[in-house]
Image (cartoon, rainbow, N blue to C red):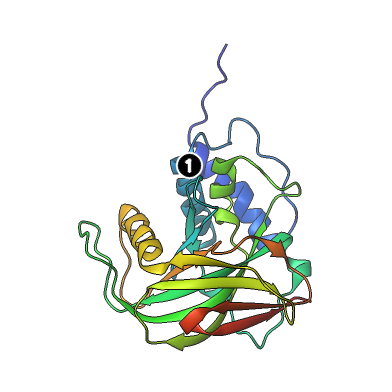
Amino acid sequence: MSEPETVDRPAQAARWLAEALESGNPLAPLPSTMTPRDMAEGEETALAVLEELGLIPCGLRLLFRGETRPPLVGPMLEARLLNPGLPVALDALRHPRATAAVVGVLGAPLLPNSDVAPVLAALHAAIDVSATRFADDPSDDAVVSADLARLGLVVVGRAKALAPGLVRAALGPKGARRPSLSCNLAARFGEAAQAARRLGGLPQGAVLVLAGLTAEVAAEGTLAASLGPLGRVEARCA
């Protein structure tokens, strides 16, 4: 016999996640009647979390996970954008993992029915420190999507007025040799823009965050990311 359907699965899951996000308390696994059935329902749940808390996103964040898995799409919150001069407080993050990232500021709106390349007024080298609200790190993509796509903190470097192109991204402990990966930022921002339009578009001044541009590293000590012409940025994890 199939399990009974809840009246509004995303809304019920969002209430649990919103409480965990607000309190900082670890969240137990979602009951089966609240677990998102697919990525689309996970994204719907993440937006419902923000609505539950009265939060307005400042843009969209994509967490890339290699070439064989689709990126996770989630809202970006302005309070989660961090100046490099401030420490990354690890005690506020559960199961943190760091990757190199790029933050793009939109110079023009992203309209839902358009397919033109996004106009970016500025690009920032960044370090994305992802985290979860759950006590046990979930592996189900739909659940991770509902959990704001592992939104933690994003340490943002200086703005550069550059067009997105090919860069080599590297991340690792400061002073250590760091392997680099080639990244086509124009293509990545195209994917981010497509996701943003699918979710209703974004206004001028909103941000598109590309996370997961390198392999994950432990979020500990001082991390340094280099992104070619976008420069370097450091994150001090404490």
The residue at the point 72 percent across, 81 percent down is: 87
Residue 57 seen: no
With respect to residue 63, does 106 lie above or below?
Answer: below
Looking at the image, residue 123 sits to the left or right of residue 236; the answer is left
Q: Residue 20, how many percent across, how many down?
A: 67, 55
Q: Tag count in the figure?
A: 1
Residue 70 position (above or below residue 2): below
Q: Which of 52 and 137 lies nearest the eye of the viewer?
A: 137
Residue ID at (59%, 51%): 147
For the residue pair 13 and 97, the one nearer the viewer reads as 97
In which quadrant of the rendered image does the N terminus lie?
top right
**Residue at disc 1, secondary structure:** helix
Q: Nearer the viewer, residue 85 or 51?
A: 85
Looking at the picture, how far across and down is residue 162, in whole percent?
Answer: 37, 83
Observer-nearest residue: 70 or 203? 70
Label 1 environment density (alpha carbons within 10 Å; few <14, some 14–19, many ≥20): some
Residue 33 in view of the camera:
yes
Q: Quadrant of the C terminus?
A: bottom right
Quadrant of residue 94 in the image? bottom right
Q: Amino acid at mark 1?
A: Met
Which residue extends farthest top? 1
Measuring from the top left, give residue 203's x and y in whole percent.
31, 71
Instruction: Say if 166 sits above or below 194 in the image.
Output: below
- Which image quarter: residue 140? top right
| Residue at the disc numbered 1 | 39
